[in-house]
Amino acid sequence: MEGMEIQTLSRTRRLLLLYCSFFRITALVVGGGLAMLPVIEEIFVVKHKLLTREELLDMTALTQTVPGIIAINSAVYIGMKIGGVPGALAAAAGAVTPPFTVILIIASLFPRLDPKNRYLLGVFSGIRACVTGMILVTGCRMFRRTVKSGLECAVVLVFFVLAVMKVSPALLILAAIPFGWCYVWWQTRRLSQAEQAADGGKKTEASSEPSAETSVDPDKDGGRGK
Amino acid sequence: MNHCIVLFFQFCKFSVLCFGGGYMLIPLLTAEFVDREQVLTMSEFGNLLSVAQVTPGPVGLNTATYVGYVNAGFFGSLAASLGLVVPTILIGCSAAAGINRWKDTFLVKGMLKGTRLAAVALIMFAVTIFLGMSVFTRTIPWEALGALFKFELPVIPDDFRVSPAGVLICGVTIVLMLKTKLPTTALLLGSAAAGALLAAWF
């Protein structure tokens, strides 16, 4: 059903739809990339039926795993799903145009503002304080989602201290990748060892009833000891 | 023109390194443009981010466009936006379509685990930068922190001050974000108004 509807939209119409939709989304939605999600759902899932809800969910997970700004990631991946590479280009162009224009206008007006006006300064310090709170809450939510053990907490702390000591953030992220490999390798090895141990424990427990192996083991050890 | 090409590649780098959303750009941008190249002061960066935050559109894109503009005008912001977009498209075309298939492999899992831990730490670092600009009206006394690491008594400088308005707005924002579902627009506009009012008061 949905496949047929995609067929009925011509190629150029689809590209135009992508460009205009993402133009609208970034022009109207204030805040981060995830705030765009309900609007994306409304346009592409409910109204035009170009994506299923499951596809959008997969996409959301994907846009948060690959590097890049979430807003551009969603534009690129949804564009690619609906219209291939040209679709991705159209959607990305649509997402970039409004912030680009608006910021250009503001940036060119900004130097004309009076930097000594105390109300203006008040407005800015108010927003800064608000942004501080927002980043803090976002960071804490990320912390709760990602940090699963005391060891991981310690790792975050080490990275934090290194960042405070002015180690370049780019370097820290690059260093985090091999660290992650080692960590996951160590974790899976420990898990499989624990599983083996658990399996072994079950076996001995199970075999302790007939008491065949358990009675043999001390004998063997005793024999070796002597 | 050369400058714009450099900017383009700088933002390509940021885009590739930006795990965990737009806020991750803050430590990357401050390290590059405030600490290393000194194109911006920390306070200018704070204003710029405030503008980017209240302007409609994704914060990361807004900030990038603005930083590009400060660096090299119109073409600078063009280079910055393109720099953020191009790597994403390249990654999308090549690898990422298959990442759902590969996401349980050791390489992808390890990379995600590591970068996420680093991202959490770096966002917390961005919080300290912002605390220094809003709640503590002066910058956080790094010298004192450095002294702490060397196990000397921390010397708190005379200009270490706490801004009551900053504490108030920041605290209220946190509470509202945790307890209510107010849209960020409302929070931002409210704190802008509160900032102006408090500035009139004190």
Image: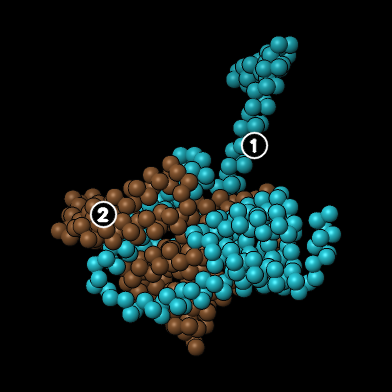
Chain colours: A cyan, B brown
Q: Picture coordinates of residue B89 (x, y %)? A: 65, 69
- For badge 2, the amino acid type reads Ala
Which quarter of the rendered picture does the C terminus of chain A lie within?
Answer: top right
The correct choice, above or below, for A82 with respect to A150 in the image is below
Mark 1 — on which chain does it sit? A
The correct choice, above or below, for B19 with respect to B178 in the image is below
Q: Which residue is mark 1?
A: A192
- For badge 1, the amino acid type reads Ser
What is the quadrant of residue B147 in the picture? bottom left
Foreground: B149 or B56?
B56
Which quarter of the rendered picture does the N terminus of chain A lie within?
Answer: bottom right
Mark 1–mark 2 distance (CA, rounded to whole Å): 54 Å
Q: Picture coordinates of residue A122 (x, y %)? A: 28, 63
Question: Dot 1, how many residues are within 10 Å of its Cα: few (below 14), some (14-19), or many (20+)?
Answer: few
The correct choice, above or below, for B32 with respect to B140 in the image is below
Q: Picture coordinates of residue A176 (x, y %)? A: 51, 56
Residue shown at 67% from the left, 17% from the top: A205
Q: Which residue is mark 2?
A: B165
Residue shown at 49% from the left, 87% from the top: B2
What is the quadrant of residue A16 in the picture? bottom right
